[in-house]
Image (tube, rainbow, N blue to C red):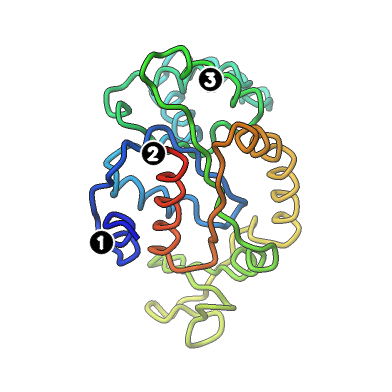
Amino acid sequence: MSSSISSVANGREADSKIAPGPILLLGAPGVGKGTQAKELVKLWGIPQISTGDLLRANVAQSTSLGQVAKEIMGRGELVPDSLVNEMVAVRLQQPDTINGYILDGFPRTLGQAGWLDGRLAAQAGTLPVVAVSIQVNYNQLLRRITGRRNCPVCQTIYNVYVNPPKQDGVCDVEGTALTQRADDTEEVFKERMRAYGALTAPVVEHYRGLGRFAEVDGDRPIGMIAAGIVAAVERLRK
């Protein structure tokens, strides 16, 4: 195990020995992509680029792209790939992306993947995207999502299966009744999984076919998952 990977596995920050370039983190709802993105941001000093965050920021700042997006969403329609692509293009022009970035939620479709690959290929000296998928089995994900409970006061998160409160349904710290998010149900989870599979499967096969895809076991401690992602990126960048 390299020194950088060992440091991540032990929960310490370290400088990676490679230029990470663009990294697409994939994984079903509940696998912990957000947590792992934060670990990689600390390790490599590169930004996390979330299309959800970009969309909200553009709307909040009333940029020209944000105004168009707001009008589309106001009609109850989905923001088209072309508009999302434009927002990403603007973000990738910022100097903090020069050594790489963590892509979260983009490319979500095969069309977005083709656009991004083409854009990067047209830029001399730019590394291509490598995709790493965090794998956790369905039943484990279901337990993570449906078992989640939140304290409305201190925001502590529990899980009735793996991290339950001392008293059923009551926060250990505040003594208040715990709540469950409306979308943390089995029915909503099944629909999110169906949508994820339908959209993401072609993206996975796209990068697998290009030899730029790897899977890591997501049913482990946070540091070990991060170490697995680092190792996968190092292999794919060779």
Which comes before the other along the chain, label 2 or label 3? 2
State how far apart marks 1 and 3 are (Cα).
35 Å
Task: Return the residue nearer the eye: 129 or 80.
Answer: 129
Q: Tell whether 43 sits left or right of 149.
A: left
Name the mark on residue 85.
Answer: 3
Mark nearest the camera among 2 and 1 is 1
Residue denoted by label 1: 12
Could you say which quadrant of the image residue 174 lies in? bottom left
Name which residue type carries label 3: Asn
Position in image of residue 15 (x %, y %): 23, 48
Position in image of residue 185 (x %, y %): 69, 61
Position in image of residue 177 (x %, y %): 52, 75
Position in image of residue 6 (x %, y %): 31, 62
Name which residue type carries label 1: Arg
Which comes before the other along the chain, label 2 or label 1? 1
Which comes before the other along the chain, label 1 or label 3? 1
